[in-house]
Image (cartoon, grey):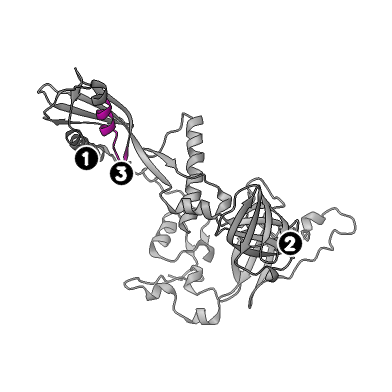
């Protein structure tokens, strides 16, 4: 995925998880630190082909997007006027040079790249890169979407998020007359750093205190964020900025080392003995077993006969390339279950054969109504079957030997 997509989606889920952690104190974070997001995540602003809950809540009517396979983005507004070189759009959000717009005409999406956009209230005059006369179907009242928000994507191209571990910082005077900097992080790990510094009574106590606070809070590009800073000195001392900064840097390095020393890698959960028995003793190519480790795993769990994975080029005939709950027969109102009990319709629904056509490729559709599944059928091309399977080209890898039936020995 492209960088804007990854930043947007991970930030979206980070905020959702933070909300759950705030609301549900019985849950704890799996890692240290808190993330801050420098933009407003919106899952509808990066590429997608629509949303669906698929079958999470049972069969629904909005499983597939039949309008367009393209990313149309968010609704922006409506065209209010069309000129020779521009269009005007009444929009609820601001536009920017470089935005990507689109509109639907005869079930086809047409794009508009914004060259320049000028504002008059909530109406924007857009000068596109394309010639107005070459844009079919443009008319006043037409709905316009935006699938590229230039300003928003520019924000994502910069530093857009960071995670910091909270620190409680305490500055003390040690028994030998120097300074002691105590650090305690949100995981309860503590470290102490001492420095024999020369200091003197401050002529301006308030200013000296502020200087110490400011210099101790400068954690910059480190993994830490100052949560609290306490200065517990018997009297207001003046300490040179260079000295307190050096103490802070040394303390941070020492605390990072303390965190590494305190880290304990979680132990793996012990394997269940004896191994759980797999519910099937024979596996077809759908198990996708193609290497020794996969085969050893299934044998360990009681599988006796394993067919070759599809990549092994041993399935010469037509097989299920995809099995899905999304059924085109249902989508086109040709499902026998829909017709059941309907007078004059029951027993009359004929949906097969159905095929999917993609360029020069044709795929047969078969329907298994008992589990309510659609199978997309196909077979490997002769050129692929005649070529060596991928594993045979890997240096040092011994090909697996598969058997269609149980060997005599």
Which of the marked residues, 2 or 3, is nearer the chain's N terminus? Answer: 3
Label 2 – label 1 distance at C-alpha: 65 Å
Picture quadrant of residue 373? bottom right
In the rendered image, the residue lying farthest to the top is 234
Q: Quick one: label 3, few (<14), some, or many (20+) residues within 10 Å?
A: few
The residue indicated by pointer 2 is: 329
| Left or right position of 216 against 107 | left
Label 3 – label 1 distance at C-alpha: 13 Å
Tell me the element at label 1.
helix
For the residues bearing labels 2 and 1, Cβ distance under 8 angstroms: no
Q: Nearer the viewer, residue 84 or 212?
A: 84
| Left or right position of 162 against 405 | left
Which of the marked residues, 2 or 1, is nearer the chain's N terminus? Answer: 1
User: Label for residue 253?
Assistant: 1
The residue range painted magenta reads: 210-224
Nearest to viewer (mark 3 / mark 1): 3
| Left or right position of 74 against 212 | right
- Image location (x, y in percent) of residue 363: 65, 72
- Image location (x, y in percent) of residue 271: 38, 46
Name the residue at 65% across, 52% down: 76
Does 223 appear in magenta?
yes
Name the residue at 56% across, 52% down: 45
Which of the marked residues, 3 or 1, is nearer the chain's N terminus? Answer: 3
User: Label for residue 220?
Assistant: none
Nearest to viewer (mark 2 / mark 3): 3
For the residues bearing labels 2 and 3, Cβ distance under 8 angstroms: no
Q: Is residue 125 visible?
A: yes
Q: Is residue 370 visible?
A: no
């Amino acid at each position: 995925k492209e960088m804007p997509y990854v930043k947007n989606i991970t930030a979206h889920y980070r905020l959702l998880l933070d909300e759950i952690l705030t609301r549900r104190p019985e849950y704890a974070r799996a890692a240290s630190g808190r993330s801050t997001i420098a933009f407003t995540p919106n899952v509808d602003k990066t590429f997608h082909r629509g949303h669906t809950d698929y079958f999470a809540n049972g069969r629904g009517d909005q499983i597939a997007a039949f309008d367009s396979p393209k990313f149309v983005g968010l609704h922006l507004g409506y065209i209010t006027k069309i000129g020779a070189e521009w269009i005007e759009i009444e929009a609820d959000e601001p536009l920017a040079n470089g935005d990507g717009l689109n509109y639907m005409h005869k079930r086809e999406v047409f794009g508009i790249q914004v060259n320049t956009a000028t504002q008059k209230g909530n109406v924007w005059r857009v000068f596109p890169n394309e010639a107005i006369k070459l844009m079919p179907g443009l008319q006043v009242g037409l709905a316009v979407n935006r699938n590229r928000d230039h300003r928003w994507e520019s924000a994502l191209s910069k530093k857009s998020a960071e995670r910091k571990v909270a620190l409680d910082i305490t500055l003390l005077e040690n028994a030998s007359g120097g300074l002691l900097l105590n650090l305690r992080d949100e995981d309860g790990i503590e470290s102490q750093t001492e420095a024999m510094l020369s200091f003197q009574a401050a002529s301006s106590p308030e200013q000296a205190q502020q200087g110490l606070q400011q210099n101790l809070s400068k954690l910059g590009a480190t993994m830490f964020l100052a949560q609290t800073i306490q200065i517990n000195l018997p009297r207001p001392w003046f300490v040179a900025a260079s000295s307190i900064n050096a103490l802070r840097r040394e303390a941070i390095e020492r605390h990072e080392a303390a965190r590494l020393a305190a880290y304990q890698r979680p132990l793996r959960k012990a394997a269940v003995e004896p191994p759980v028995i797999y519910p099937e003793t024979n596996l077809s190519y759908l198990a996708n077993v193609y290497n020794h480790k996969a085969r050893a795993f299934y044998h360990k769990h009681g599988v006796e006969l394993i067919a070759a994975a599809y990549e092994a080029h041993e399935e010469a005939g037509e097989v299920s390339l995809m099995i899905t709950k999304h059924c085109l027969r249902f989508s086109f109102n040709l499902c026998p279950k829909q017709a059941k009990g309907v007078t004059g319709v029951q027993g009359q629904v004929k949906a097969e054969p159905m095929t999917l056509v993609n360029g020069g490729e044709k795929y047969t559709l078969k329907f298994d109504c008992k589990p309510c599944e659609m199978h997309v059928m196909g077979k490997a091309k002769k050129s692929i079957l005649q070529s060596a399977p991928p594993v045979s080209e890997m240096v040092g890898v011994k090909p697996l030997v598969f058997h269609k039936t149980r060997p005599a020995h």
